Image (cartoon, helix red, strand yellow):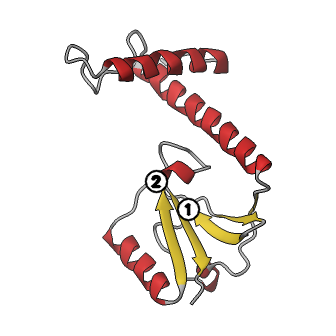
Amino acid sequence: MMSPAIRRSEALMALTAYGQTIVDARHPEVPFDSKPRGLTDGQLDDLQRQCAEVLVGIRREIDRRYGVKTSLSERGAPWERGDYAHWIDHRYKVRTPKGQWFVSEPYLMDGDDIVDLARLVNEGWDVLIGAERARWFPGATTAVELRRGER
């Protein structure tokens, strides 16, 4: 049986309550891995997705304020030449007044993926990996940013 979807306002209230739970986790009587009390697993999944949507909205507003634009254009991307790998997922291009770069947001990376990225570094690409930059599904994907290095 599917749980009813949580509305955005309920998600924000639950997120605030869960944030308080995390703060309270400094006390030994509250386990760090506890989930918000009273929510089913399905509701927790809904909450995670709603929170990700809130984070995406925040990222879009930050991008708008700083003149950041994203597109699905892949012209010039390192994977354009056909070297597709496991880590190439949810890909896009980012343009800012300071330059442009390509982004892939995989859910998971393994050793072979790291070897691919090291090869790209050797070919003159700068590689930056950071979960806080994820736009696709914050909390589940990790942004892998690639730009041509200044060598």
Q: Which residue is mark 1?
A: 89
Residue lying farthest top? Answer: 38
Residue lying farthest left? Answer: 28
Mark 1, Cα crowd under 10 Å, few <14 / some 14-19 / many 20+, is some
- 108 or 25, which is in the foreground? 25
- 45 or 93, which is in the foreground? 93
- 86 or 142, which is in the foreground? 142
Q: Which residue is mark 2?
A: 107
Q: Is residue 66 above or below residue 53?
A: below
- Say which residue appears at 74% left-offset and 42% top-offset: 61
Residue 112, image quadrant? bottom left
Q: Secondary structure at mark 2?
A: loop
- Say which residue appears at 48% left-offset and 73% top-offset: 85
Q: From this viewpoint, is residue 5 visible?
A: no
Question: Is tag 1's residue or tag 2's residue first in the polypeptide sequence?
Answer: 1
Residue 36, image quadrant? top left
Q: Is residue 65 above or below residue 145?
A: above
Q: From this viewpoint, is residue 110 visible?
A: yes
Q: Position of residue 31 (x, y in %)?
A: 24, 21
Q: Is residue 106 above or below residue 115?
A: above
